[in-house]
Amino acid sequence: MVWKRSQWARGDNRRTACRRCGLSTRPVSEAIGVCLHCLRTRPEEALPIAQEAHRRAREAFGMPAVAPRTPGGIRCGLCAWDCTLGEGERGYCGLRMAQKGRLVHLAGTPEKGLLQWYRDPLPTNCVADWVCEGHHRRGDHNLAVFYGSCTFHCLFCQNWHFRELSPQAGPLLSAQELANVANPHTFCVCFFGGDPSSQMPHALAAGRLLARKGVRVCWETNGMMHPKLLDHAVQLSLETGGCIKFDLKAFDENLHIALTGASNRRTLENFQRAAARIPERPQPPLVVASTLLIPGYVDAEEVHRIARFIAAIDPEIPYTLLAFAPHFLMADLPCTSSTHAQEAVEAARAAGLSRIRVGNVFLLDMPVPF
């Protein structure tokens, strides 16, 4: 399926008005349909409008509109959705289904992962690059593992094309086959996507094989995996000198659901769980956080709340604020402004964090033609 910008963006510079309050004084994405103020103050009216956008978009890609909750069905349990599948139903991630009374894994096992990979020369555009030894490893590379599934459904996803991969069409690769592509210049591996949370058995198996080759194991994740799977991921990073990078997209749960389709409760719980192990290896940083500065939605107030949450755990956890560029269904928003970024930095600092960086600075104030 080829996704066309015109399916959601109008193609001009008119401001979209919020479908609940009717105001257009701040950026409103046509896909979400409602403004930040309404999501914060009238979520019972605003949130269903945004959820309808998720439903339509998921169905357009042949994905279950919601996580199945069939009474008496087969439980998956690999992530926070905890899908319960009736006969023939697929889970939210699309990789598991109930068939003849058992759970069938279409992908995401050590034997078959739905993914693409490439060698990313170091230093690279990683949210942890500024606190990682990889920044100084010119001539080496990161093994970037792009998983073709996710447990979120972000309407702004810059890697939305993972939805065009499928267990039926591939590409499928075993953990051993993936580990075999590492060479003496493979300094680190990063499991991202999509997200590794929907294929953790594969990622953990591959990570262990790569660790035996001396490769640092890193993760970039929404943190939706089962806590026990997270523990194994953190252990691999601890042992190899890698890190786990959490995308903390919003602190307000209603805003988070509007943007990603999912609650952030498991994400925040797993972040705390991983950060509790920082004393086992203070350097290099074990846990890194990042937040995308989405115009009109993730403002300085939201950043302050996220940063306050992080600082209460450890004020020295590195925090990267990422400039936004319009993607996927939120292609009608502008890029992050330098003013927005500066306000966010000041908010994070006021919340108590000491290690803050703005990433993707080349996108700041960039004009985007519609």
Image (cartoon, rainbow, N blue to C red):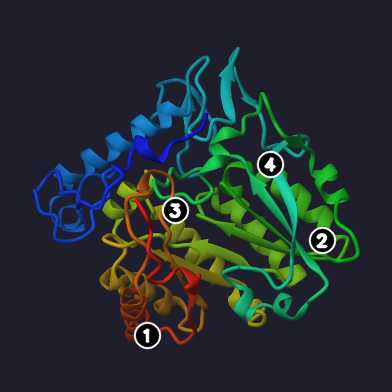
Q: What is the spatial separation of the Cα atoms under label 1 and label 4, in whole angstroms?
A: 37 Å
Amino acid identity at mark 3: Arg
Q: From the viewer's perspective, is residue 247 above or below residue 62?
A: below
Residue at the spot x=37%, y=64% of the render? 367
Amino acid identity at mark 2: Ala
Local SS, label 1: helix
Local SS, label 3: helix
Q: What is the spatial separation of the Cα atoms under label 2 and label 3, in whole angstroms?
A: 27 Å
Earlier-in-chain disc, 2 versus 4: 4
Viewer-side label of 3, 4: 4
Identify residue for label 1. Answer: 349
Identify residue for label 3. Answer: 266
Residue 60 percent coordinates (x, y): 42, 27
Viewer-side label of 2, 3: 2
Amino acid identity at mark 1: Arg
Residue 347: quadrant of the picture: bottom left
Amino acid identity at mark 4: Leu
Q: Is residue 253 left or right of residue 133?
A: left
Earlier-in-chain disc, 1 versus 4: 4
Residue 183 percent coordinates (x, y): 89, 59
Residue 344: quadrant of the picture: bottom left
Identify residue for label 2. Answer: 211
